[in-house]
Image (cartoon, rainbow, N blue to C red):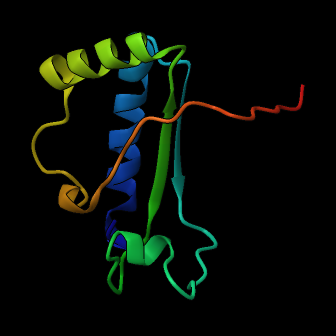
């Protein structure tokens, strides 16, 4: 993510978060890299081939179940997917689905 486009990314994230929620997501988190040390084998910056002047954004969307996630993503891509000038290089973005194995939250 180009550092110079942080505000553009924030605007896109703010626009899309309610869309995800509208299709059933229970939580949307967008986080700007703040402490990304160089690793010995790999690290966040190398994972996305970040260049000078770029930062890493870590995002996740929580869904109540896989069926809601699959239906939500399909609708988002069909009806509400971002268009126009994206503030990042989507070819270096990666994603996947995860099922919790431990989930401990402070109340």
Q: Position of residue 100 (x, y in %)?
A: 63, 32
Q: Nearer the viewer, residue 14 or 80?
A: 80
Q: Residue at x 18, y 25 (%)?
A: 77
Q: Nearer the viewer, residue 10 or 96?
A: 96
Q: Quadrant of the N terminus?
A: bottom left
**Outermost residue, right direction?**
107
**Image quadrant assignment for residue 19:** top left
Q: Residue at x 32, y 18 (%)?
A: 70
Q: Quadrant of the C terminus?
A: top right
Q: Nearer the viewer, residue 34 or 102?
A: 102
**Outermost residue, front direction?**
101
Q: Position of residue 99 (x, y in %)?
A: 56, 30
Q: Position of residue 106 (x, y in %)?
A: 88, 32
**Above or below for 52 versus 1:** below
**Image quadrant assignment for residue 7:** bottom left
Q: Position of residue 26 (x, y in %)?
A: 55, 18
Q: Is residue 99 left or right of residue 10?
A: right
Q: Residue at x 44, y 17 (%)?
A: 66
Q: Is residue 51 left or right of residue 17?
A: left
Q: Nearer the viewer, residue 8 or 97?
A: 97
């Amino acid at each position: 993510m180009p550092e110079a486009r942080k505000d553009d990314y924030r605007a896109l994230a703010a626009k899309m978060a309610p869309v995800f929620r509208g299709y059933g997501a229970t939580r949307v988190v967008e986080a700007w890299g703040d402490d990304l040390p160089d690793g010995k084998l790999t690290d966040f910056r190398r994972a996305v081939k970040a260049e000078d002047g770029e930062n890493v954004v870590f995002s996740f969307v929580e869904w109540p179940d896989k069926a809601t996630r699959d239906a939500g993503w399909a609708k988002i891509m069909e009806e509400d997917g971002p268009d126009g000038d994206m503030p990042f290089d989507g070819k270096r973005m990666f994603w996947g689905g995860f099922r919790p194995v431990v989930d401990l939250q402070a109340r």
